[in-house]
Image (cartoon, rainbow, N blue to C red):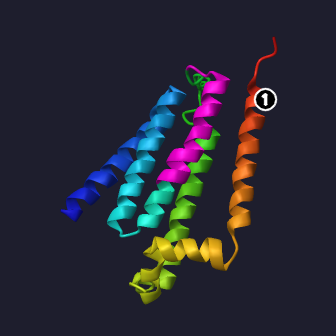
């Protein structure tokens, strides 16, 4: 049953991520990105990481996507602007060639890094079992190490950024 759920969540994440890039309407892209984040949260639940799944939903699908929605709605972009027509004689723009080279370089670097560390690094670590406990993570973050101030300061910073976006995007009468 878990394998079927994995394939469903993985397929949903891949399809919605591809559709995010392919949409012309920015609002549809934002909504599909929220669906992609939800599918990733489902994959985290299957990996027995409930804290990561919940933070995926709260932080990304909740806070960050609300900011994206505000920006899209405030800028009032009905559709993406069409790309400029290709210059005659050039089959592909230079940016696409650079992106292809950088993608191949990244893939080669990833293969090199994974070959150096080996697959034994991904084995189940006994200390990793304590990471999935939401109670331990919460008490460590907010009680023992005193990160509550940094958490609240980040919340205020995000609120100020959102207010600044509203002020900058409003239209003068």
**Dot 1: few (<14), some (14–19), or many (≥20) neighbours within 10 Å?**
few
The quadrant of the rendering that contains the C terminus is top right
Q: In the displayed image of the protein, which residue is found farthest to the left? A: 1
Q: Which residues are magenta?
A: 57-78
Q: Residue at x 71, y 44 (%)?
A: 159
Q: Nearer the viewer, residue 114 or 60?
A: 60
Which residue is under mark 1? 167
Label 1 secondary element: helix
Q: Nearer the viewer, residue 83 or 67?
A: 67
Image-based side of 2 in relation to 14, left or right = left
Q: Nearer the viewer, residue 100 or 76?
A: 76
Q: In the displayed image of the protein, which residue is found farthest to the top? A: 173
Characterize the magenta stretch by its predominant secondary structure.
helix
As displayed, is residue 145 above or below residue 12? below
Q: Residue at x 42, y 88 (%)?
A: 126
Residue 107, image x and y in percent? 51, 64
Residue 49, image x and y in percent? 41, 68
As displayed, is residue 66 above or below residue 153? above
The quadrant of the rendering that contains the N terminus is bottom left
Q: Residue at x 46, y 58 (%)?
A: 54
Q: Residue at x 54, y 56 (%)?
A: 103
């Amino acid at each position: 049953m878990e394998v079927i759920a994995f394939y469903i969540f993985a397929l949903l994440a891949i399809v919605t991520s591809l559709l995010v890039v392919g949409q012309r309407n920015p609002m549809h892209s934002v909504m599909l990105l929220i669906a992609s984040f939800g599918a990733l949260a489902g994959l985290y639940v299957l990996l027995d990481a409930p804290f990561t799944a919940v933070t995926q939903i709260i932080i990304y699908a909740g806070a960050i996507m609300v900011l994206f929605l505000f920006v899209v709605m405030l800028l009032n972009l009905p559709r993406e602007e069409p790309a400029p027509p290709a210059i005659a004689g050039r089959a592909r723009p230079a940016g696409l060639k650079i992106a292809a080279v950088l993608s191949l370089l990244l893939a080669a670097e990833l293969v090199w890094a994974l070959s150096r560390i080996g697959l034994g690094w991904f084995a189940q670590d006994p200390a990793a079992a304590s990471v999935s406990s939401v109670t331990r993570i919460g008490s460590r973050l907010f009680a023992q190490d005193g990160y509550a101030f940094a958490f609240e300061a980040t919340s205020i910073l995000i609120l100020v950024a959102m207010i600044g976006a509203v002020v900058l995007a409003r239209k003068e009468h």
